[in-house]
Amino acid sequence: MLSLIRTLLDGASVRAEDGLKDRFAIDLLAQRIRDAEAGLAAAKQTLASLIVRQRAEQAGLDQLQRRHADLESRTLSALAAGNNGLAESGAAAIAELENEREVRRATVQSLGEKTLRMRVSVERAHRRIIDLNQGMISARAIDAERKAQSRLVRSIGHSASLNDAEELLAHITGASDPFEEAGILDEIDGELRHEAIRDRLANAGHGPAVKVRAKDVLERLKAVN
């Protein structure tokens, strides 16, 4: 029983959360974009720091290379002059510089790789944020259209009311003319009472006229004159 209640509560919570997401989707999207832009700004700052460190390490390595070349040249000169003691001191210093050079080279390489990865990540995030901002424009337009449609539905009622109104209109406009129906009914009644055949016989000259005709009136008036 408790498990069932917990499941029902979880379902209600999920539905409520989905409802809030649908209602405030644009606001949530805008906030997510702002969060992404803040993260991108922090990533750019980190990238800038890496580039500064890489350049500093590269400058130190270049200076070390120059010192190494200068010291090596002087040590060779000492050897050529037969000054072995001074040459040995120069060789020891060169060895230290070469060890330091390897460390600096590794540092520069590591910083270069980190900088490259960070630059790729920043560029990818930048493109995604651009796409999100462009999508935000479309989302706002769609949301405004949906809200307008919702207001329209609330103002004119549900579609069932529209359907009923359309059916009533079709019924009214498609109804037969009552005057025409009355005339047809009179004709039918006359035929049933044999009045129609009597009128046709009279009109053909068989027997006296059933009704006064315009022709009869005209002949009577001519006779008076």
Image (cartoon, grey):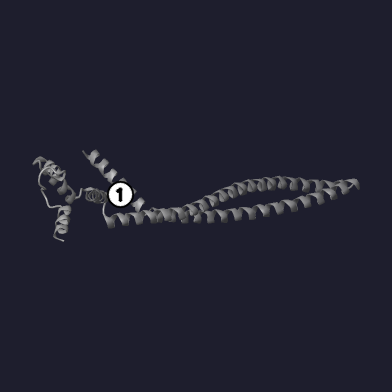
The residue positioned 12% from the left and 52% from the top of the image is 212
Q: Nearer the viewer, residue 149 or 72?
A: 149
On the rendered image, what quadrant is the N terminus found in? Answer: top left
Q: Is residue 53 above or below residue 3?
A: below
Q: Nearer the viewer, residue 126 or 224?
A: 224
Q: Position of residue 84 (x, y in %)?
A: 86, 46
Q: How many marks?
A: 1
> Would residue 212 be found to the left or right of residue 50 on screen?
left
Quadrant of the rendered image containing residue 149: bottom left
Q: Position of residue 136 (x, y in %)?
A: 46, 54
How many neighbours does mark 1 have within 10 angstroms: few (below 14), some (14-19), or many (20 or more)? few
> Would residue 166 be found to the left or right of residue 215 on screen?
right
On the rendered image, what quadrant is the C terminus found in? Answer: bottom left
Can residue 40 be seen from the camera position used here? Answer: yes
Can residue 28 be seen from the camera position used here? Answer: no
Q: Secondary structure at mark 1?
A: helix
The residue positioned 65% from the left and 52% from the top of the image is 54
The residue under label 1 is 16
